[in-house]
Protein backbone atom coordinates (compact mmCIF):
# COMPACT_ATOMS: atom_id res chain seq x y z
CA UNK A 1 0.00 0.00 0.00
CA UNK A 2 2.39 2.65 -1.19
CA UNK A 3 2.56 5.70 -3.34
CA UNK A 4 5.24 4.96 -5.87
CA UNK A 5 8.36 7.05 -5.45
CA UNK A 6 11.61 6.77 -7.35
CA UNK A 7 13.42 7.32 -4.11
CA UNK A 8 11.59 6.15 -1.04
CA UNK A 9 13.02 7.51 2.20
CA UNK A 10 10.45 6.14 4.65
CA UNK A 11 8.10 3.21 4.23
CA UNK A 12 5.60 2.48 6.97
CA UNK A 13 3.58 -0.74 6.68
CA UNK A 14 1.00 -2.30 8.98
CA UNK A 15 1.84 0.09 11.82
CA UNK A 16 -0.32 -0.67 14.83
CA UNK A 17 0.05 1.16 18.15
CA UNK A 18 -2.24 0.37 21.06
CA UNK A 19 -2.77 1.71 24.56
CA UNK A 20 -3.50 -0.87 27.24
CA UNK A 21 -5.61 0.95 29.79
CA UNK A 22 -7.62 -0.28 32.78
CA UNK A 23 -10.74 0.23 30.71
CA UNK A 24 -9.57 -1.84 27.77
CA UNK A 25 -7.28 -1.71 24.76
CA UNK A 26 -7.36 1.36 22.56
CA UNK A 27 -6.03 0.92 19.02
CA UNK A 28 -4.83 4.47 18.40
CA UNK A 29 -3.08 3.54 15.14
CA UNK A 30 -4.37 0.51 13.28
CA UNK A 31 -2.64 -1.08 10.29
CA UNK A 32 -1.40 2.24 8.92
CA UNK A 33 0.78 2.32 5.80
CA UNK A 34 2.33 5.09 3.71
CA UNK A 35 5.59 6.13 2.07
CA UNK A 36 7.54 9.37 1.97
CA UNK A 37 9.79 10.03 -1.01
CA UNK A 38 13.11 11.87 -0.79
CA UNK A 39 12.63 15.63 -1.09
CA UNK A 40 8.84 15.28 -0.67
CA UNK A 41 6.33 16.65 1.81
CA UNK A 42 3.75 14.14 3.01
CA UNK A 43 0.67 15.76 4.56
CA UNK A 44 -0.83 13.60 7.32
CA UNK A 45 -4.34 14.93 7.80
CA UNK A 46 -7.14 14.21 10.23
CA UNK A 47 -9.28 15.61 13.00
CA UNK A 48 -8.11 15.41 16.60
CA UNK A 49 -8.05 11.86 17.89
CA UNK A 50 -7.47 10.41 14.41
CA UNK A 51 -4.04 8.98 15.30
CA UNK A 52 -1.76 11.46 13.46
CA UNK A 53 0.40 12.35 16.43
CA UNK A 54 0.60 8.76 17.70
CA UNK A 55 1.79 7.79 14.20
CA UNK A 56 4.55 10.43 14.45
CA UNK A 57 5.53 9.30 17.94
CA UNK A 58 5.60 5.69 16.73
CA UNK A 59 8.04 6.61 13.94
CA UNK A 60 10.26 8.34 16.54
CA UNK A 61 9.72 5.38 18.92
CA UNK A 62 8.47 7.81 21.55
CA UNK A 63 5.30 5.94 22.53
CA UNK A 64 5.17 5.69 26.31
CA UNK A 65 3.34 3.34 28.69
CA UNK A 66 0.58 2.27 28.64
CA UNK A 67 1.11 2.56 24.87
CA UNK A 68 3.07 0.08 22.77
CA UNK A 69 3.79 -0.46 19.09
CA UNK A 70 2.31 -3.90 18.54
CA UNK A 71 2.92 -4.46 14.85
CA UNK A 72 4.27 -3.25 11.55
CA UNK A 73 7.50 -2.01 10.01
CA UNK A 74 9.01 1.47 9.81
CA UNK A 75 11.78 1.27 7.23
CA UNK A 76 13.81 4.48 7.17
CA UNK A 77 16.98 4.87 5.11
CA UNK A 78 16.91 1.12 4.58
CA UNK A 79 16.67 0.08 8.27
CA UNK A 80 13.57 -1.02 10.19
CA UNK A 81 13.45 1.42 13.13
CA UNK A 82 11.46 -1.11 15.14
CA UNK A 83 14.50 -3.42 15.09
CA UNK A 84 16.99 -0.86 16.48
CA UNK A 85 18.12 -0.82 20.08
CA UNK A 86 17.59 2.34 22.16
CA UNK A 87 21.14 3.64 21.61
CA UNK A 88 20.81 3.30 17.81
CA UNK A 89 17.40 4.94 17.99
CA UNK A 90 18.82 7.90 19.94
CA UNK A 91 21.23 8.46 17.07
CA UNK A 92 18.34 8.47 14.60
CA UNK A 93 16.31 10.94 16.69
CA UNK A 94 17.62 14.41 16.23
CA UNK A 95 20.41 13.45 13.88
CA UNK A 96 18.52 11.67 11.03
CA UNK A 97 14.92 12.63 11.92
CA UNK A 98 14.14 16.06 13.41
CA UNK A 99 10.85 17.01 14.99
CA UNK A 100 9.00 20.33 15.29
CA UNK A 101 6.19 20.42 17.82
CA UNK A 102 2.90 22.26 17.96
CA UNK A 103 3.63 24.27 21.10
CA UNK A 104 7.22 25.51 21.13
CA UNK A 105 7.00 26.87 24.70
CA UNK A 106 6.66 23.36 26.10
CA UNK A 107 9.38 21.95 23.80
CA UNK A 108 11.95 24.62 24.77
CA UNK A 109 13.64 24.84 28.16
CA UNK A 110 12.48 28.15 29.73
CA UNK A 111 15.66 28.64 31.80
CA UNK A 112 18.21 28.08 29.03
CA UNK A 113 19.25 30.71 26.49
CA UNK A 114 18.45 29.99 22.85
CA UNK A 115 22.13 29.59 21.94
CA UNK A 116 22.64 27.03 24.70
CA UNK A 117 19.64 24.96 23.63
CA UNK A 118 20.73 24.72 20.01
CA UNK A 119 24.35 24.04 21.07
CA UNK A 120 23.16 21.18 23.27
CA UNK A 121 21.52 19.50 20.27
CA UNK A 122 24.75 19.84 18.28
CA UNK A 123 26.86 18.54 21.15
CA UNK A 124 24.67 15.49 21.78
CA UNK A 125 25.09 14.47 18.15
CA UNK A 126 28.62 15.87 17.74
CA UNK A 127 27.51 17.84 14.68
CA UNK A 128 29.17 21.24 14.84
CA UNK A 129 30.53 20.72 11.33
CA UNK A 130 34.10 21.70 12.27
CA UNK A 131 33.55 25.46 12.37
CA UNK A 132 32.89 25.69 16.07
CA UNK A 133 29.56 25.36 17.77
CA UNK A 134 28.84 29.08 18.15
CA UNK A 135 29.41 29.67 14.44
CA UNK A 136 27.16 26.75 13.52
CA UNK A 137 24.39 27.98 15.85
CA UNK A 138 24.52 31.40 14.18
CA UNK A 139 24.31 29.79 10.73
CA UNK A 140 21.28 27.80 11.83
CA UNK A 141 19.54 30.87 13.24
CA UNK A 142 20.22 32.59 9.93
CA UNK A 143 18.77 29.68 7.98
CA UNK A 144 15.49 29.92 9.89
CA UNK A 145 15.14 33.59 9.13
CA UNK A 146 16.81 35.49 12.00
CA UNK A 147 18.90 38.33 10.59
CA UNK A 148 20.25 39.15 14.06
CA UNK A 149 21.52 35.77 15.32
CA UNK A 150 24.00 37.25 17.84
CA UNK A 151 21.15 38.92 19.69
CA UNK A 152 19.03 35.73 19.67
CA UNK A 153 21.84 33.57 21.07
CA UNK A 154 21.55 35.19 24.50
CA UNK A 155 17.77 35.45 24.71
CA UNK A 156 15.44 33.19 26.67
CA UNK A 157 12.34 31.60 25.06
CA UNK A 158 9.94 33.97 26.86
CA UNK A 159 11.66 36.94 25.18
CA UNK A 160 10.61 35.66 21.73
CA UNK A 161 7.24 35.70 19.98
CA UNK A 162 5.41 32.43 19.19
CA UNK A 163 6.62 32.51 15.58
CA UNK A 164 10.22 33.18 16.66
CA UNK A 165 10.11 30.29 19.12
CA UNK A 166 8.85 28.04 16.33
CA UNK A 167 11.86 29.16 14.23
CA UNK A 168 14.18 28.18 17.06
CA UNK A 169 12.60 24.72 17.17
CA UNK A 170 13.07 24.46 13.42
CA UNK A 171 16.76 25.39 13.86
CA UNK A 172 17.09 22.58 16.42
CA UNK A 173 15.27 20.12 14.16
CA UNK A 174 17.61 20.77 11.21
CA UNK A 175 20.77 21.23 13.31
CA UNK A 176 22.29 17.86 12.52
CA UNK A 177 21.27 17.71 8.85
CA UNK A 178 18.40 15.20 9.12
CA UNK A 179 16.91 13.67 5.99
CA UNK A 180 13.39 13.78 7.49
CA UNK A 181 11.62 16.35 9.63
CA UNK A 182 8.28 15.60 11.27
CA UNK A 183 6.33 18.81 11.88
CA UNK A 184 3.34 18.24 14.18
CA UNK A 185 0.80 21.05 13.66
CA UNK A 186 3.64 23.62 13.86
CA UNK A 187 1.47 26.57 12.89
CA UNK A 188 -1.77 25.86 14.76
CA UNK A 189 -1.01 28.23 17.67
CA UNK A 190 0.13 31.10 15.40
CA UNK A 191 -1.73 34.01 13.82
CA UNK A 192 -2.44 33.79 10.09
CA UNK A 193 0.39 36.08 8.94
CA UNK A 194 3.02 34.29 11.06
CA UNK A 195 1.56 30.97 9.96
CA UNK A 196 2.22 31.69 6.32
CA UNK A 197 5.78 32.89 7.07
CA UNK A 198 6.55 29.64 8.93
CA UNK A 199 5.02 27.52 6.14
CA UNK A 200 7.09 29.38 3.54
CA UNK A 201 10.19 28.83 5.63
CA UNK A 202 9.53 25.10 6.05
CA UNK A 203 8.97 24.70 2.32
CA UNK A 204 12.20 26.57 1.61
CA UNK A 205 14.15 24.38 4.04
CA UNK A 206 12.86 21.19 2.40
CA UNK A 207 14.06 22.52 -0.97
CA UNK A 208 17.42 23.93 0.02
CA UNK A 209 18.44 21.24 2.49
CA UNK A 210 17.15 18.37 0.34
CA UNK A 211 15.05 16.97 3.17
CA UNK A 212 11.69 15.24 3.31
CA UNK A 213 8.91 16.22 5.67
CA UNK A 214 5.85 14.72 7.30
CA UNK A 215 3.53 17.65 7.92
CA UNK A 216 0.79 16.81 10.41
CA UNK A 217 -2.27 19.03 10.27
CA UNK A 218 -6.05 19.18 10.41
CA UNK A 219 -5.99 21.92 7.75
CA UNK A 220 -6.45 20.62 4.19
CA UNK A 221 -5.61 24.02 2.73
CA UNK A 222 -2.08 23.78 4.10
CA UNK A 223 -1.58 20.39 2.45
CA UNK A 224 -3.01 21.72 -0.80
CA UNK A 225 -0.34 24.44 -0.86
CA UNK A 226 2.59 22.48 0.61
CA UNK A 227 2.31 18.76 0.08
CA UNK A 228 3.25 16.26 -2.60
CA UNK A 229 1.19 13.41 -1.18
CA UNK A 230 -1.53 13.13 1.43
CA UNK A 231 -2.72 10.54 3.94
CA UNK A 232 -6.17 10.97 5.41
CA UNK A 233 -6.56 9.45 8.88
CA UNK A 234 -9.75 8.77 10.80
CA UNK A 235 -10.19 6.90 14.10
CA UNK A 236 -6.71 5.38 13.86
CA UNK A 237 -7.09 4.18 10.25
CA UNK A 238 -5.72 5.48 6.99
CA UNK A 239 -8.79 6.02 4.80
CA UNK A 240 -7.22 7.53 1.70
CA UNK A 241 -3.70 7.86 0.38
CA UNK A 242 -3.03 9.89 -2.73
CA UNK A 243 -0.88 12.35 -4.62
CA UNK A 244 -2.04 15.81 -3.56
CA UNK A 245 -3.14 16.92 -7.03
CA UNK A 246 -5.31 13.81 -7.46
CA UNK A 247 -6.90 14.16 -4.04
CA UNK A 248 -7.91 17.77 -4.59
CA UNK A 249 -9.12 17.03 -8.10
CA UNK A 250 -11.18 14.04 -7.03
CA UNK A 251 -11.14 12.76 -3.46
CA UNK A 252 -12.52 9.22 -3.36
CA UNK A 253 -13.43 8.41 0.24
CA UNK A 254 -16.74 9.88 1.45
CA UNK A 255 -14.86 11.35 4.44
CA UNK A 256 -12.37 13.13 2.17
CA UNK A 257 -15.21 14.36 -0.05
CA UNK A 258 -17.03 15.67 3.01
CA UNK A 259 -13.96 17.41 4.40
CA UNK A 260 -13.21 19.04 1.11
CA UNK A 261 -16.82 20.07 0.75
CA UNK A 262 -16.63 21.72 4.15
CA UNK A 263 -13.74 23.96 3.07
CA UNK A 264 -15.21 25.03 -0.24
CA UNK A 265 -15.36 22.11 -2.62
CA UNK A 266 -13.05 20.47 -5.09
CA UNK A 267 -12.64 21.11 -8.77
CA UNK A 268 -15.64 20.06 -10.79
CA UNK A 269 -17.95 19.90 -7.77
CA UNK A 270 -20.63 22.24 -6.59
CA UNK A 271 -18.92 24.72 -4.28
CA UNK A 272 -21.60 24.67 -1.63
CA UNK A 273 -20.15 24.47 1.88
CA UNK A 274 -21.17 21.24 3.55
CA UNK A 275 -20.47 19.95 7.03
CA UNK A 276 -20.07 16.28 7.88
CA UNK A 277 -22.81 15.31 10.34
CA UNK A 278 -21.79 13.62 13.60
CA UNK A 279 -18.35 13.47 15.18
CA UNK A 280 -15.24 11.28 15.26
CA UNK A 281 -15.93 8.17 17.41
CA UNK A 282 -14.01 7.58 20.63
CA UNK A 283 -11.20 5.10 19.99
CA UNK A 284 -12.44 3.00 22.90
CA UNK A 285 -15.93 2.77 21.40
CA UNK A 286 -15.37 2.25 17.68
CA UNK A 287 -18.35 1.25 15.57
CA UNK A 288 -18.31 -2.17 13.92
CA UNK A 289 -17.41 -2.48 10.24
CA UNK A 290 -16.31 0.72 8.54
CA UNK A 291 -15.38 3.21 11.27
CA UNK A 292 -16.92 6.03 9.21
CA UNK A 293 -20.30 4.32 8.71
CA UNK A 294 -22.31 6.31 11.31
CA UNK A 295 -21.52 9.50 9.37
CA UNK A 296 -21.53 8.20 5.82
CA UNK A 297 -24.24 9.25 3.36
CA UNK A 298 -23.46 6.21 1.14
CA UNK A 299 -23.75 3.51 3.81
CA UNK A 300 -24.65 -0.03 2.66
CA UNK A 301 -25.54 -3.08 4.77
CA UNK A 302 -22.07 -4.61 4.61
CA UNK A 303 -20.49 -1.34 5.87
CA UNK A 304 -21.84 -2.07 9.36
CA UNK A 305 -20.48 -5.60 9.42
CA UNK A 306 -16.91 -5.81 8.13
CA UNK A 307 -14.18 -3.23 7.76
CA UNK A 308 -13.09 -2.62 4.16
CA UNK A 309 -9.40 -2.92 3.25
CA UNK A 310 -7.25 -0.36 1.45
CA UNK A 311 -7.37 -0.77 -2.31
CA UNK A 312 -5.56 1.05 -5.11
CA UNK A 313 -8.42 2.46 -7.20
CA UNK A 314 -6.47 4.78 -9.47
CA UNK A 315 -2.70 4.86 -9.87
CA UNK A 316 -1.26 6.04 -6.55
CA UNK A 317 -4.73 6.60 -5.09
CA UNK A 318 -5.64 4.13 -2.35
CA UNK A 319 -8.96 4.11 -0.52
CA UNK A 320 -10.62 2.09 2.26
CA UNK A 321 -14.26 1.98 1.18
CA UNK A 322 -16.76 -0.56 -0.22
CA UNK A 323 -17.85 1.89 -2.91
CA UNK A 324 -14.65 0.93 -4.74
CA UNK A 325 -14.34 -2.78 -3.95
CA UNK A 326 -16.57 -4.53 -6.49
FE1 LIG B 1 -19.35 4.79 3.60
FE2 LIG B 1 -19.47 2.14 3.44
FE3 LIG B 1 -17.49 3.46 2.26
FE4 LIG B 1 -17.59 3.26 4.91
S1 LIG B 1 -17.32 1.59 3.46
S2 LIG B 1 -17.15 5.08 3.75
S3 LIG B 1 -19.78 3.41 5.26
S4 LIG B 1 -19.67 3.58 1.75
Image (cartoon, rainbow, N blue to C red):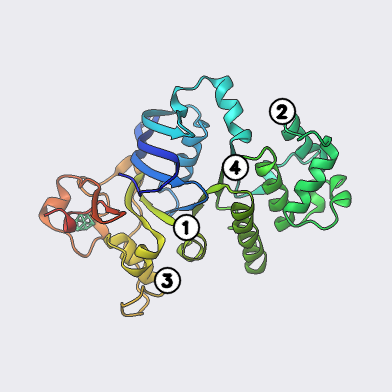
* Mark linked to residue 218: 1
Question: Badge 2: few (under 14), some or many (20 or more) residues near its Cα, within 10 Å?
Answer: few
Quadrant the N terminus occupies: top left
Residue lying furthest front in this view?
6
How packed is label 3: few (under 14 Cα within 10 Å), some, or many (20 or more)?
Answer: some
- Location of mark 4 (residue): 99
Point 81% across, 38% down: residue: 111
The answer to the question of whether label 4 and label 3 lie on touching residues, with beta carbons closer than 8 A, is no
Distance between the Cα atoms at labels 2 and 4?
15 Å
Check contact, mark 3 vs mark 1: CB within 8 A: no
- Using the numbered discs, state the Cα–Cα distance from disc 4 to disc 3 in whole angstroms: 28 Å
User: Residue 295's spot in the image, x, y percent?
Assistant: 27, 60
Whether residue 161 is situated above or below residue 72 in the rendered picture: below
Instruction: Please tell me whether mark 2 sits on a helix, a strand or a loop.
Output: helix
The earlier-in-sequence mark between 2 and 3 is 2
Q: Earlier in the sequence, mark 2 or mark 4?
A: 4
Left or right: 98 in relation to 39: right
Upstream in sequence: badge 4 or badge 3: 4
Comparing 286 with 58, the one in front is 58
Can residue 310 be seen at all in this image of the molecule? yes
CA gap, disc 1 and disc 4? 18 Å
Mark before the other along the chain sequence, 1 or 4:
4
Judging by the rendered image, the residue that carries numbered circle 2 is 124
* Residue 66 in view of the camera: no
Q: Is residue 48 left or right of residue 283?
A: right
Select label 4 or label 3 by which is in front.
4
Label 3 – label 1 distance at C-alpha: 12 Å
- Of residue 307 and residue 20, the one placed in the foreground of this image is 307
> What secondary structure is found at the residue carrying circle 1?
loop
N-terminal label among 3 and 1: 1
Amino acid sequence: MVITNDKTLLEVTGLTTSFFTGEGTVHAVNDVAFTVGRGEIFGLVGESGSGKTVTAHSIMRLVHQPGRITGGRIVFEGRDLLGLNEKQMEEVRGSRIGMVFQEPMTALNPVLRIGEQISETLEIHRASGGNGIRQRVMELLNKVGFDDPEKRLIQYPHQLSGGQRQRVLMAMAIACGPSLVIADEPTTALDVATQSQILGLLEGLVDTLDMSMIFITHDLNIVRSLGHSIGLMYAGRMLELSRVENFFKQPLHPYGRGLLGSIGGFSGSARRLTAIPGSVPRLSELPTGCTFHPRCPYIMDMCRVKEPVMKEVEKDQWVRCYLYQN
